[in-house]
Amino acid sequence: MTSKFVVGLTGGIGSGKSAVTALFEKHDIDIIDADEVARDVVAIGSEGLAQISAYFGSDILLESGALDRAAMRERVFNNENEKAWLNELLHPLIRARMLDLINESLSPYCILSVPLLVENKLTSMCQCVVVVDCPEQMQLQRAIQRDGNNEQTIKNIMASQANREERLAAADYVLDNSTTIGSLASQINALHEKLLAQATA
């Protein structure tokens, strides 16, 4: 494990994790984003991508040779066996890469931003957990607008994630992202001071 002070950040799809991490970056805090790590481990030329294309076939790739993430998402969220296979491949690769990035972090604390932090029991990698929260109907609308997936696919993704109550039960701190970006920024300014104090105690 690591001696670094790691802050786990999570929230359901469409809750606003990207907005939160952007605000923490303004405080020069290193962000380790599980979604970026997940892209890295299936980048062109990676072992992860080679195994995926061998299993699913070349029609899961774009013309460039990169993974067609939209096609992949549609497939695995409607097939439990394929989803389980993909998770078994990717989770160890992602976890190992996240640990490397934590150990390379130079900021007083680092943020591990993971959509499935609670579900995949990655809270054990963190000293504390921050949950970005908003009503589920707001999550749904934001995710549809952002991702271009249909409503049912977003609902399937939400159903596969911890529900709002489960996430909040795991939280040491909650950020309310149901109003304005200004409100969110002031919450993060206050939380940053608390986390700095904890990390340097």
Image (cartoon, rainbow, N blue to C red):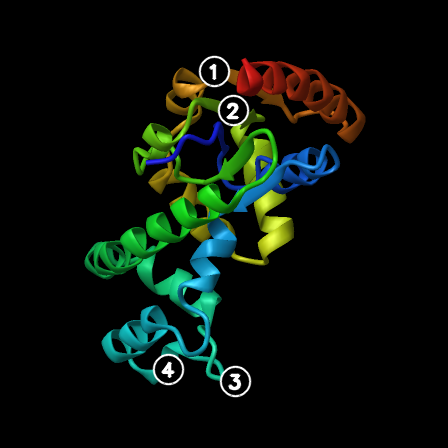
N-terminal label among 4 and 1: 4
**Disc 4: which residue:** 59
User: Label 2, label 1: how many angstroms apart (C-alpha)?
Assistant: 6 Å
Helix, strand or loop status at disc 4: helix
On the question of residue 141 being in view, the answer is no
Query: Where residue 148 sits in the image (x, y, percent)?
Result: 59, 58
Q: Residues within 10 Å of mark 4 (few under 14, many from 20)?
A: few
Q: Is residue 11 above or below residue 143?
A: above
Query: Where residue 88 sits in the image (x, y, percent)?
Result: 22, 55
Q: Residues within 10 Å of mark 1 (few under 14, many from 20)?
A: few
**Disc 1: which residue:** 172
Residue kind at label 3, given as amino acid type:
Ser
Q: Are marks 2 and 1 in contact (CB under 8 Å)?
A: yes
Q: Are marks 2 and 3 in contact (CB under 8 Å)?
A: no
Q: Which residue is nearer to you in this view: 39 or 61?
A: 39
User: Label 1, label 3: how many angstroms apart (C-alpha)?
Assistant: 43 Å
N-terminal label among 2 and 1: 2
N-terminal label among 2 and 4: 4
The label shown at residue 135 is: none
User: Label 2, label 3: how many angstroms apart (C-alpha)?
Assistant: 37 Å
**Disc 2: which residue:** 130
Residue kind at label 4, given as amino acid type:
Asp
Instruction: Quadrant for residue 57, please give it.
Output: bottom left
N-terminal label among 2 and 3: 3
Of labels 2 and 4, the one closer to you: 2
Query: Where residue 94 sits in the image (x, y, percent)?
Result: 37, 53
Of labels 1 and 3, the one closer to you: 1
N-terminal label among 1 and 3: 3
Residue kind at label 2, given as amino acid type:
Val
Of labels 3 and 4, the one closer to you: 3
Q: Is residue 124 left or right of residue 186?
A: left
